[in-house]
Amino acid sequence: MKDQYEKTLTEVTNTKNNDGLSGIDKMAMNLDKYDEGTVILADINIEDTMKRIMQMVDIPIAEEEVNYYMDHFHIAPMQLEYIHQFYAKYFGNCQDLALIPKRQLIILALIMKKILLIDLGYDPDTKEMKEAALPYILTGNLEDRSVNRMIRAQKFVDSLEESYKYQRLVDEDYRMLLEIPGKEDSIKAKLSTLVNTKFTYVTYEAPELTGTEITYDVESIADELLSFLEYI
């Protein structure tokens, strides 16, 4: 290995040198430098990517709106996962996404909400707009979560499995996951988590709704979730 990489391997020990530093001390110092450099690069990527996203979507986000969500929106891990999935292709890695400050994260969540309100609200059959629930769920507050139960209604399950969106996701994006023996259906698990969780509105545009429960029918939220998974 030494000849191959032209490096001198040094044993990491607790033995102090003349400067009072052990091999472990030096390694820790180098790791700190590496971590600091990683954070700096992540900050640069976050700043550049945020600017690029804002230019691409051209959706105005008022400071007052961001401040409202800073005060009222408490991001749950489930929602954070969806936000990260939505923007992963823009940032290029999950590590940088995890370092985004709350204010920038809320801006991203609001952009996502407004995109989804249009994309999920448009009905291609009727050519009309309808009120989508998922955008409000992902930017609302999680109030209560029941025991996570898989959806058992056979009629609904059959309808879900027959939909072209579900079949495409199963055949392409989730194929390898679903082939793991004993692994539960990831798509159905996500849907079950949503419908077994109570969410309330956080709406700057309609503050009278903030704190009221978000209601929807399972068929509609299933279709919205499938569309979201296709988007990412």
Image (spheres, rainbow, N blue to C red):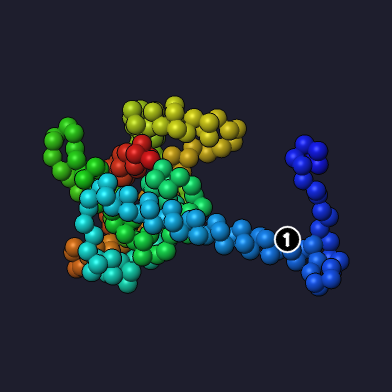
Residue on which disc 1 sits = 27
Please say if 18 is above or below 51: below
Total marks shown come to 1
Horizontal placement of 147 versus 220: left or right?
Answer: right
Of the pair 85 and 182, the residue shown nearer to us? 85
Quadrant of res 160? top left
Instruction: State the image coordinates of residue 13 (x, y, percent, origin top left).
Output: 84, 61
Quadrant of res 179? top right
- Residue at x 51%, y 52% (from the top left corner): 95
Can residue 213 be seen in this snapshot? no
Instruction: State the image coordinates of residue 171 (x, y, percent, origin top left).
Output: 44, 26
Instruction: State the image coordinates of residue 3 (x, y, percent, origin top left).
Output: 81, 38
- Residue at x 41%, y 43% (from the top left corner): 89
- Residue at x 68%, y 65% (from the top left corner): 29
Q: In the rendered image, which quarter contains the N terminus?
A: top right
Can residue 120 be seen in this snapshot? yes
Of the pair 61 and 142, the residue shown nearer to us? 61
Instruction: Give the residue type that dot 1 points to.
Output: Met
